[in-house]
Amino acid sequence: MKALLFGEILWDIIDNKPYIGGAPFNLAAHLAKMGLKSTLISSVGKDALGREALKEVEKRSIDSTFIRIHPHLPTGIVEVSLDERGHPTYLIKENVAWDNIALDQDLADSSAKNKWKVFCFGTLAQRTKENRELLSQIISWVHPHQVFYDLNLRQNYYQKEWIEKSLCQSSIVKLNDREALIISELLFGQTLKQEKLAELICREYDLSIVCITHGKNGSSVYRNGKLEKVPGINGPVADTVGGGDSYSAGFLFSYLCGTSIYEAAEFGEIVGNFVVSQSGAVPKYPKWLEKEIENLKYKEKK
C-alpha cells in the first residue's frame, strides 16, 4: 500500500532539545513503520536542522522524492511547552521552509504510475497562499482511494474558507474535542452535539467518515448516520506529543486493511495509547504491536 502526505516537517524544541516532528511527518513515519510506502511532500531549509531532518526522513523509511531543500528559508521550528500532565502548547515560527513547499519533481507524472491508497493533509501547512494553491493542484493530480484530512488546528493558523475547501476535498476527516467545538461554531454558528456535528459535516461537505478523538476517553467514529463510541485505554502518559498522529496512523492502516471503522478506531486507540506512554512522537514499536500490525496485513491480503 502507498500513502502520499503533504505538509510540515519541523523540529519541536522541548526543554531546549530539538525533536523531529510535524503532524504529516509523524503520520508518514508511523505508516512507514506499519509497512506502507510513505511519500511526503514538504520542504526543509539549507541548514543544519534541514540536513538532520533529511537524515530522520531516511531513518524512518519515508520517501523523500518530493521534499525540497529551500535555498533561503530556514527549517521550521516550534517551541513546545508541556504542562504537568504532559499536554503541549505550541509557538510556531513563521517564514520557514515548509511555508513555501514546491515540487522539483513531476508529481503529476508520478501519480499516473502510483496507485495511492490514501492522500493525507492538514490545516497548518495551508497558512500560506502558495501552499494552498499547491495543495489544490496536488489533489487534482492524485487519485487515491481515500483522502484523509486531519484538522490539526494550531494557534490562529486557520480560516473558515480553508477548512470548508479541505472538507469538500476529503473523504475522511479527523478532529479532537476542542476542534469539534471550534468547527461547530465556525461552520454552523452554534455549539452542536458531536453526533449532529458529524452528521452535518458529512451531509454538507459530502464526507464518508468523521473521527473525533477524546484523549483518554477514547474516540467516536461516524458513518452512514451512525455514531459509535470507542472506549479509551487507561495507561501511563509520558507526553501527548504525536498522540493524535499515531491514532490517525492506526486508524488509517487498519481501515485500509479492510476492517470496520469501529475496529479501525480501536486499533487507533491501541497505537495512540502506546505512543503517549513513551517519550517522542514515533517511538520504537514493541513486539506485541508489531504482531498486531502483521495480523492486520494478513487480513488485508485475504
Image: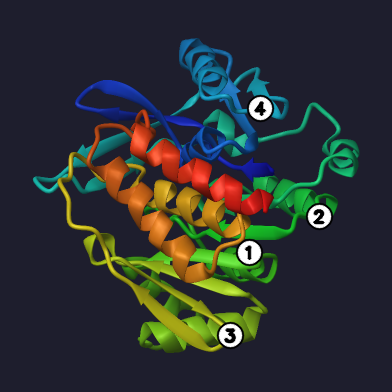
Residue 117 sits above or below residue 62 on the image:
below
The answer to which of marks 2 and 4 sits earlier in the sequence is 4
Between 238 and 121, the residue placed more toward the observer is 238
Q: Nearer the viewer, mark 3 or mark 4?
A: 3
Residue located at (51% from left, 18% from top): 59
- Tell me the CA gap for discs 3 and 1: 20 Å
Q: Which structural element holds mark 3?
A: loop
Instruction: Give residue 143's mark.
Output: 2
- Tell me the CA gap for discs 2 and 4: 19 Å
Residue underneath mark 4: 63
- Counting from the top left corner in percent of width and height, residue 127 is at 55, 50
For residue 65, which quarter of the picture? top right
Confirm whether residue 250 shows in the render: yes
- Tell me the CA gap for discs 4 and 1: 24 Å
Q: Which structural element holds mark 1?
A: helix
The answer to which of marks 3 and 1 sits earlier in the sequence is 1
The answer to which of marks 4 and 1 sits earlier in the sequence is 4
